[in-house]
Amino acid sequence: MVDEAKMKELRAALEEQRAHLHKEITELGGDPDSLDAEIDVERGFADSAHSTAERARVLSVMKALRANLRWVNRALTKMELGTYGVCERCGQPIAVERLEVLPWAILCIDCKQKGEGR
Ligand SMILES: [Zn+2]
């Protein structure tokens, strides 16, 4: 399991990542708390001269940022609930080394490799 000191470190990393993602989304004209990236992008580009290609590019970046933000928020929620660092699939602890690299990981490395095949 993750000890308290490490947990603090990981929480700080998650909060930092969340702030970073919020900033990026806002800079792209989005609302980090809204769940619909497409609406954001439509709104942001409604009266601008961006091309369709540019809009599509921003939309895909925005979607990726939001997906990451969802994982980060989920990890923070799990910290609140005391279920952080436990694999959602097999219930085994996730290796601390993995959490250090990916603090928002919700699957252990075994399940991740089995589950997604990439
Ligand atoms: Zn697992």
Image: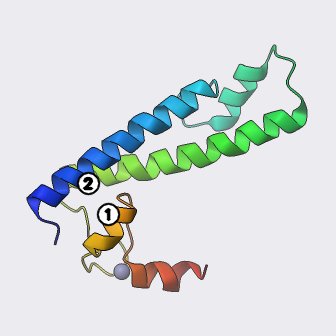
Q: Reply above or below: 50 against 101.
A: above
Mark number for residue 100? 1
Residue denoted by label 2: 10
**Residue drawn at (41%, 85%) of the image:** 110
- Residue 95 left/right relative to 33: left
Q: Position of residue 88 (x, y in %)?
A: 35, 71
Q: Of all residues shown, which one is farthest toward the left? A: 4
**Residue drawn at (10%, 58%) of the image:** 4
**Which kind of residue does numbered mark 2 sit on?**
Leu
Image quarter in which the C terminus is found: bottom right
Query: How crowded is the residue under tag 2: few (<14 C-alpha within 10 Å), some, or many (20+)?
Result: many
Secondary element under disc 1, as helix, strand or loop, is: helix
Secondary element under disc 2, as helix, strand or loop, is: helix
- Residue 83 left/right relative to 27: left
Residue 91 seen anywhere in this rendered image of the structure: yes
**Residue drawn at (71%, 29%) of the image:** 41
Q: CA distance from mark 1 to mark 2?
A: 7 Å
Q: Reply above or below: 94 against 58.
A: below
Residue 34 seen anywhere in this rendered image of the structure: no
Q: Of all residues shown, which one is farthest toward the top? A: 47
**Which kind of residue does numbered mark 1 sit on?**
Glu
- Residue 36 left/right relative to 54: left
Q: Is mark 2 within 8 Å of ligand 1?
A: no
Splitting the image into four quadrants, where does ligand 1 fall? bottom left
Choose top left, top right, bottom left or bottom right for residue 105: bottom left
Q: Reply above or below: 59 against 42.
A: below
- Disc 1, disc 2: CB below 8 Å? yes
